[in-house]
Image (cartoon, rainbow, N blue to C red):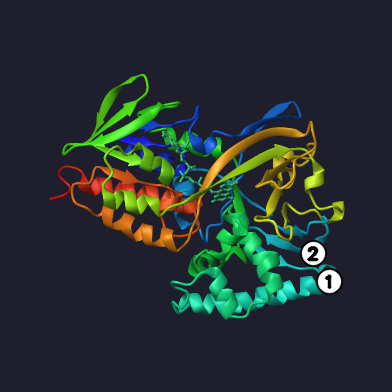
Amino acid sequence: MEIAVVGGGLAGLVAAWRLAARHRVTLFERLARPGLAAHGVDIAHGGATLRVDMPLRVYFPGYYPTLARLYDELGVASEPVSYATTFSDEQGRTYFRWRNLRWRDRSWPFVLPQDLLGARARRIVRGALRFRAAALPALARGELAGRTLAEFVAAARIEPDFVDGLLLPAVATIGTCTLADAAAYPADVVAAYHAGGLARESVRRACGGADEVAARLLAPVQRVVCEAGVTALVRDAQGVTLHRRGAAAERFDHAVLACAAPQARELMADATAAEDGALAGFRCRPLTVLMHRDAALMPARRADWSPVHAHVRAGAERPESTIWINAVQPALRDAPALFQTVQPLREPRAGTLLAEARFERALVDAASERALAQLARLHAEPGRRLWWAGAWAHRGVPLLESAAASALAVAQAIEAAAPGRAA
Ligand SMILES: Cc1cc2nc3c(=O)[nH]c(=O)nc-3n(C[C@H](O)[C@H](O)[C@H](O)COP(=O)(O)OP(=O)(O)OC[C@H]3O[C@@H](n4cnc5c(N)ncnc54)[C@H](O)[C@@H]3O)c2cc1C
């Protein structure tokens, strides 16, 4: 079959890779490079040029079984990195810090006695233990279904210092959303992420970064069109016609929309009311990522620096998080300090900014949960030619795992619909 995949983020790349084994696949990307690797920045160091992913993305196999299997199959090497985190307040003072005890692929978060001198830090630890003790059994018993994170922590009387000082900022950092969005997250989605093994497994990054992952996934793909200018997709009984600016219309047997839900909606010239309704359930939050060299966005005391810095200001709608790139990318360990700040609340000092990129991230809430069920019903319709894949189109925190899992599920559904298979 001739198959179009629109969008070259991880979901589009994985769908294209899997389908290219048996079909002729064309991947259309809006940007100049496939989106997964489009925003990386070249950093000169030690006579070489090193590519730093923007955003830097990590995973841990316990919550990312699909991604871990995929990287194994592709031969993508990965390495453990420390994600120890320092939390600071609006004055830049550290109010909590956890470290990583790492051994091979294992990693255990721990808090040093000296980091527990403040009463707030002790209340955060008490809250963390209480949250774990309450949330994981409730998850196993199915008692979290239909409850938001805010509802669960209120009912379980979890320490407010932990909720406001660590839990919500952490969810808002992992999901790059506001603190209010984090409070509206389904409690079982957050608990399942936690249960995935973060407290015992090291997070990992692909050693060759997004470029290597994209190159391996694209190797079997017959055709890649960047800066594609796709304007619309129109269906008929035999397939899908894809329209692009300045190019002839092209026919495909199937098309996978592997872009964000609002963008997918814009491209669908003939969306049904049911499709419209489902896609409207997925909202996105725009965000900015900065690559820079301004140490002022790290904790005020150099001794408090960790690979991750969560800056949580009372009254701010979101946390600011800064990754200390030298601490997570071994080749840059001895290079001048390099930082990546996500959802910045402050501007890096003039002259220290190296790059800026904008992204959109899907939100997870009661509406997106309902929309996922509608999407599954639409995907099961007989004769379907148009499909959706993306981190938003699979249950869980929208991460590389859900992007890969949704793409493989769509590829499997298209295979099942292939001539000779349906019977
Ligand atoms: C700051 C930040 C940090 C993150 N950190 C992590 C992390 O550590 N670990 C983790 O697992 N995940 C992380 N994520 C999330 C992860 O990056 C995403 O969940 C995942 O990459 C989404 O992949 P996707 O293919 O679903 O969507 P996207 O990556 O958004 O891909 C969609 C693609 O579609 C393209 N597109 C859109 N419209 C069109 C069009 N009209 N025509 C053609 N192409 C189009 C876009 O350009 C893009 O390339 C992070 C995200 C952000 C923003």
**Image quarter of the N terminus:** top left
- Residue at the (36%, 43%) spot, across then down: 265
Three-letter amino acid code of the residue under disc 2? Tyr
Location of residue 116 with respect to 409 vertically, above or below: below
Considering depth in this image, is 352 or 304 the residue closer to the camera? 352
Tell me if label 2 and label 1 are in contact, CB under 8 Å: yes
The percent position of residue 218, horizontal first and vertical second, equals: 43, 34
**Residue 95 — which label?**
2
Precedes in sequence: disc 2 or disc 1: 2
**Dot 1 beta carbon under 8 Å from ligand 1:** no
According to the picture, the residue beneath numbered tag 1 turns out to be 118
Q: Is residue 176 left or right of residue 236?
A: right
- Residue at the (27%, 50%) spot, across then down: 273
SS at mark 1?
loop
Three-letter amino acid code of the residue under disc 1? Gly
Location of residue 61 with respect to 419 vertically, above or below: below
The percent position of residue 233, horizontal first and vertical second, equals: 30, 34
Q: Is residue 191 left or right of residue 335?
A: left
SS at mark 2?
strand
